[in-house]
Amino acid sequence: MVGRLRAPFFLPMIARALLSAFLMLPSGSAPKASEATASVGLREGPLGAASSLRAFLPDTVLTPPGGPAIVFLTSPSPGVTALRLSVPFVEGPTEAGAERLLELLARERMRGLAAPVGARVWSSRTPWGIAYTVEGAEADFEYLAYLLRQAVAEPRVEDPSFTRARRRLEEELARSRETPGAAIEAMLRRRIEPEAPPPGGTEVSLAALDAARTLEVWRRSHQASGMTLVVATSLPAEVVLAATRGVGAPEEDAAPPLDAPLPAPRTSSRPETLRSWLGLGYRMGPPTDPATAVVAKLLADRLRTVVRGYEARVELWEAADAHILAITGAGYRRARGAMRRTLGNLVPQARRELDAERVRRAVARVRRDLLFGARTPAGLVAAVGRARDATGEPQAAAGYLSSLESVGVIQVRAVLEAMTEQPPIRVEIEP
């Protein structure tokens, strides 16, 4: 796969600096469109009408005591509603893999219950925790909310699903060690974020992740007061508020994560491969800077024109406070030298060839991808929810799109210059 750009749904996702304050409004006090637009500096410009950006602005934001914050949006599809409930989650080193385990258990519960009403459900890990999303007919809103309550309910650790989920984690960990592509990613992440626990856990941490510890982690992490619900609906706020009652774990069970040091792995293995693998990793600036996404597009474009005889790709990976731009490649012995030269020279060459037209096209494609992803109710709540999780700002998604409009050659060149001045993290796997 040549020049592939795989990026998280909202790419850099936005920033505490984009917006100066929360939009804290009581039910029925939604801002007028003009007021909301002014609050994040939306403006007409070459990227399209400001009306496209207004879709990302909350109608209302409520913060009920003891319950999740609720961000209300207008559904882009009348009669269809979507809800996204995010759970902030910080794993201690010895708890590595617990977040993924809880997500797998919740996903299985949601899927089993969604079929009667034809609802679609998703779950995902994010740098800030876990997110659960459900989309379906607005007439079934109460049942859709029930699905979310089940997702964050106490896990049934006595159920066979618990054993199946743990076994799946162990299999995923084994595959990640045997697959060169996964191993390259893990090596880069470990070098760039050495303090972060492995998201899939380790042999030692998974072995210790028994029923008692899983329940302990759930009680500590799944507090309703820390959650955020983003909902795209036309229903009254009172209906949504009623649907969130009793969600999550009891507040009195809150506790900090275990801070014991990360156990050493039991084994050290090296993946089998017939090709040479190379990974170059750059820790970028805060996830608020849309120029990072534009640079990733430009680098992926260049790869499509220069790669011959080997595989290469550009990817953006999320971290809690930054993005990681990774350039990876794999080639057989005859292409190994060309691969190393091309990937090593990719950033300097992109800087030399930079011009306004390339930047304009890349910016337009970043914006198009974001708007296309948010064309459905589920996509919209995902975009706004991830931005809210990353920054604490309910208007951050609209702010990010607005700031994208001002990205030009100067901003992109500054990012590329910073990348050339600091050598990337480099990892390799040889046959």
Image (cartoon, rainbow, N blue to C red):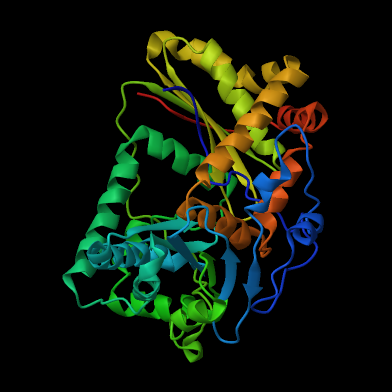
Q: Which of 198 and 231 is in front in this view?
A: 231
Q: Nearer the viewer, residue 305 or 74?
A: 74
Q: Is residue 78 left or right of residue 158?
A: right
**Residue 179 locus on image (x, y percent):** 32, 36
**Residue 23 locus on image (x, y percent):** 72, 69
Picture quadrant where residue 140 is located: bottom left
**Residue 226 locus on image (x, y percent):** 56, 76
Q: Is residue 86 above or below residue 194?
A: below
Q: In this view, does 277 lie above or below 73?
A: above
Which residue is at a point 47% across and 49% down the rendered structure image?
Answer: 376
The residue sitting at the left extreme is 160
Which residue is at a point 56% across and 56% down the rendered structure image?
Answer: 386
Q: Nearer the viewer, residue 286 or 188?
A: 286
Which residue is at a point 36% across and 21% down the rendered structure image?
Answer: 275
State how many labels appear.
Answer: 0
The reply to whether residue 408 is in sight is yes
The residue sitting at the front extreme is 78
Indicate the quadrant containing the C terminus: top left, top right, bottom left or bottom right.
Answer: top left
Picture quadrant where residue 290 is located: top right
Picture quadrant where residue 395 is located: bottom right
Which residue is at a point 32% across and 62% down the rendered structure image?
Answer: 107
Indicate the quadrant containing the N terminus: top left, top right, bottom left or bottom right.
Answer: top left
**Residue 85 locus on image (x, y percent):** 48, 67
Q: Is residue 304 left or right of residue 61?
A: left
Q: In this view, does 193 lie to the left or right of 393?
A: left
Q: In this view, does 285 lie above or below 246?
A: above
Q: Is residue 238 above or below residue 401?
A: below
The reply to whether residue 223 is in sight is no
